[in-house]
Structure formats: structure tokens, C-alpha cells
Image: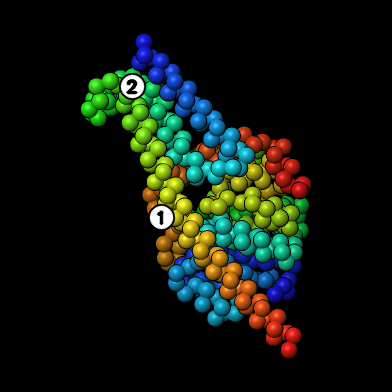
């Protein structure tokens, strides 16, 4: 049911230990936006808990992975013609007290996408050295190719306006995780992107999606993804955006 | 020298395959994650084709007397790895497809029930 012009999209996969507190905190800081949880075929009681709290939930019939779940949320937002959306993870890493700030940034400024960065401003977040190197490396590539400085390319805490929602709902969103390549795509398509500082916490409970050892696979895939985006070029993405 | 010719063919073939895969990804006919094994295979074959000493060593380990023949065996391994990967992917897709069809059937039933209720 659409009651507001903005919607908070929360992708969740096996988050029965966290989702209740996340929704409680969201409710506390929510400036009257609709709330949608996209349950990515969890095998636990995530969906049940969300429904118990009376929030809206989309239960995906198969597990799509993070990007696929988020994109389902974008599709929903596009269908119901929301003016903007705010996306935060269902694992409690994203402090919901920044929702009003993101909402304000996306509605009152010209920006199409507002990214919550954990490295702008006071950083209260520990990251293993090896991942820090990776983030710095890919951040540098983004800065080089777009001419814009990006401090936190892997953030999943962001706000999008209707144009950006439509762009991502049209299959321009990665199935796995949004990352440096997504930022270059946004820039090439001509969207205005801004970073604002947010605080991220360590996971409250459960298993992180980045917990396994797939770092090498990640780096190679990321390099390939960025290379392909550069190969496609600005013209390609500009054309898709005006569709 | 036949050894040199096969080296050239192997390098050229690998480069052409890599170029085709890149083009397919660019046109979005192939997803990045399904291209990685192809690139890995191409890189392995290119390295072994150019680096003759390494190929000799690998051939010795495999028990192959004529080193360039080892290239075929390795290419065969790469092909096997890709087939296996594809079989896994297809199996996943089959499962997902089944679930989706069932879900659509259930949803259609629900919609029909709702329509009937509304008509009453």
C-alpha cells in the first residue's frame, strides 16, 4: 500500500536475529516513509517476523543474491511510482538514524543518488587491512575514470530519486553486489552522485555476506566488470538512461 | 618447426576466444561471472604457449614426451572444468525455474479466487 512518496527498501537474507531491531530503529527514525523488506528467500523466520511487525514484505520465491533482491525493491518502487527510495541492509550495519538526512539530501538537492559513506567524517569502523587496500584501489579507479572522489564504493546505504530507480530497475543493477563498476556506470549515464558521511556498525549477529575467502575471485571479477564498463563507454549508458 | 607453429596457433586461438568473450560481455550476451572460466582457460593456454620451459616441465609431470601435446590435454581439462561449471549452473536454473512456475501457478489460483469473491 502506497502511503508516502518515498520508500525505505531493506534487503534481508536469513536475518531473523537482526531484522526486528532494524525495523524498530527504522520506525524510530522514519520521517513517514513506507517500509519494504525484500526477503531474498531466507530459510529462517525473517519473513514471519517482518509480517508480525506489520511491515510490508516481498518474499522472493528463489534466492537471487543481494543485487537481485535490491533490484526487486527498485522494481516495486518504480511500479508504485515512488519519488525516491532509501536502501539499507537488513543486518543492522547501517545506522537508521541517518535516514532523515539521506531523505533530505535526495529530495532537496539536485543529486540523483546519495551514497552513505562510512569513511567520510569520523570513521568508527574497523576493516581488515587487505580489504582496505582493495577498497582504496577500486576507489582510485573510480576517481580516475569519473573525475569524482569516492570514499566508499561498496556502500549499500544509499538514497535514489525516481530517475535513478528507473535506471536500476531496467537491468542496470548488478546481480551480485553494487561496487566500483556501478559508480562508474552512474557517472557515465550522467547521474549526479554525492556522498554523505554515515556511521556503520559491525554486524549485530549472523554471518556477513563477505565472510568467505573469495577475495581473489572478487578482485578479478571487479577488474573485469570495470573494464567492460569502460569498454561500453559513456554513449552506451547515456542512451540507456534516456530510454 | 612444428613446435613453434603450434605455439603460434595456440596463442592466436586463445586471443581470439578472449576477444569474442569480451565482445559478448560488452553486448550483454554473457554475464561477467560466467566468463571468468573462459578467461582463466585462455590465460593458462597463452602462458603455456609462450613460456616453452614451463610447458616442458608440465609435460614432464604429465608424462607427455612431446610438449605441445600437453597443450591439448590442458585445453581438455579447461573444457571439462567449463562443462562441469555449466552443468552446475543449468541444474540451479532448472530448480529456480521449477520454483518460479509453481509460484506463478499458485499466484494465478489466488487471483482467480479473489476475482470470484469480488463477483459475488
Graded by Cα atoms within 10 Å as few (under 14), some (14 to 19) or many (20 or more), the crowding at tag 2 reads many
Q: Is residue B15 above or below residue A146?
A: above
Q: Which residue is mark 2?
A: B68
Q: Name the quadrant containing residue B110.
A: bottom right
Q: A33 or A80: which is nearer to us?
A: A80
Q: Position of residue A57 (x, y in %)?
A: 59, 72
* Mark pair 2, 1: CA separation: 41 Å
The mark closer to the camera, 2 or 1, is 2
The secondary element bearing badge 1 is classed as loop
Q: Is residue B116 visible?
A: yes
- Which chain is indicated by disc 1? A
Q: Position of residue A72 (x, y in %)?
A: 61, 61
| In the displayed structure image, the side of residue A95 where residue B89 appears, left or right | left
- Which chain is indicated by disc 2? B
Q: Are marks 2 and 1 in contact (CB under 8 Å)?
A: no
Q: Is residue B43 above or below residue B106?
A: above
State the residue at coordinates (51%, 31%).
Answer: B18
Q: A78 or A95: which is nearer to us?
A: A78
Q: A150 or A45: which is nearer to us?
A: A45
Which mark, by number, is residue A211? 1
State the residue at coordinates (56%, 61%).
Answer: A69
Q: Position of residue A206 (x, y in %)?
A: 42, 65
Q: Name the quadrant containing residue A36.
A: bottom right
Point out the residue furthest to the top here: B1
State the residue at coordinates (44%, 72%).
Answer: A44
Amino acid at each position: 500500500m502506497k502511503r508516502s512518496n518515498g520508500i525505505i527498501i531493506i534487503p534481508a537474507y536469513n536475518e531473523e536475529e537482526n531484522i526486528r531491531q532494524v525495523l524498530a530503529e527504522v520506525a524510530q527514525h522514519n520521517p513517514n516513509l513506507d517500509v519494504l523488506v525484500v526477503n531474498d528467500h531466507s530459510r529462517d523466520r525473517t519473513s514471519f517476523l517482518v509480517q508480525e511487525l506489520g511491515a510490508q514484505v516481498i518474499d522472493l520465491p528463489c534466492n537471487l543474491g543481494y543485487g537481485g533482491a535490491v533490484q526487486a525493491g527498485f522494481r516495486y518502487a518504480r511500479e508504485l511510482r515512488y519519488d525516491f527510495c532509501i536502501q539499507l541492509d537488513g543486518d543492522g550495519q547501517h545506522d537508521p538514524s541517518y535516514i532523515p538526512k539521506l531523505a533530505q539530501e535526495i529530495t532537496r538537492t539536485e543529486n540523483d543518488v546519495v551514497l552513505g559513506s562510512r569513511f567520510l567524517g569520523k570513521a568508527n569502523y574497523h576493516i581488515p587491512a587487505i580489504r582496505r587496500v582493495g577498497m582504496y584501489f577500486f576507489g582510485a579507479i573510480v576517481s580516475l575514470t569519473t573525475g569524482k572522489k569516492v570514499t566508499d564504493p561498496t556502500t549499500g546505504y544509499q538514497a535514489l530519486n525516481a530517475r535513478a530507480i528507473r535506471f536500476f530497475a531496467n537491468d542496470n543493477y548488478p546481480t551480485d553486489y553494487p561496487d566500483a563498476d556501478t559508480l562508474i556506470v552512474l557517472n557515465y549515464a550522467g547521474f549526479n552522485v554525492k556522498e554523505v558521511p554515515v556511521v556503520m556498525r559491525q554486524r549485530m549477529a549472523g554471518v556477513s555476506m563477505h565472510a568467505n575467502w573469495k577475495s581473489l575471485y572478487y578482485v578479478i571479477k571487479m577488474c573485469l566488470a570495470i573494464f567492460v564498463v569502460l569498454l561500453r563507454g559513456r554513449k552506451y549508458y547515456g542512451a540507456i538512461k534516456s530510454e | 618447426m612444428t613446435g613453434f607453429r603450434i605455439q603460434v596457433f595456440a596463442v592466436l586461438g586463445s586471443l581470439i576466444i578472449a576477444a569474442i568473450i569480451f565482445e559478448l560481455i560488452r553486448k550483454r550476451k554473457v554475464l561477467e561471472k560466467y566468463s571468468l572460466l573462459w578467461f582463466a582457460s585462455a590465460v593458462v593456454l597463452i602462458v603455456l604457449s609462450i613460456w616453452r620451459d614451463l610447458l616442458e616441465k608440465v609435460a614432464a609431470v604429465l608424462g607427455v614426451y612431446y610438449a605441445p601435446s600437453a597443450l591439448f590435454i590442458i585445453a581438455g581439462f579447461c573444457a571439462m572444468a567449463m562443462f562441469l561449471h555449466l552443468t552446475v549452473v543449468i541444474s540451479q536454473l532448472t530448480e529456480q525455474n521449477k520454483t518460479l512456475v509453481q509460484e506463478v501457478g499458485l499466484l494465478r489460483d489466488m487471483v482467480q479466487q479473489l476475482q470470484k469473491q469480488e463477483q459475488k
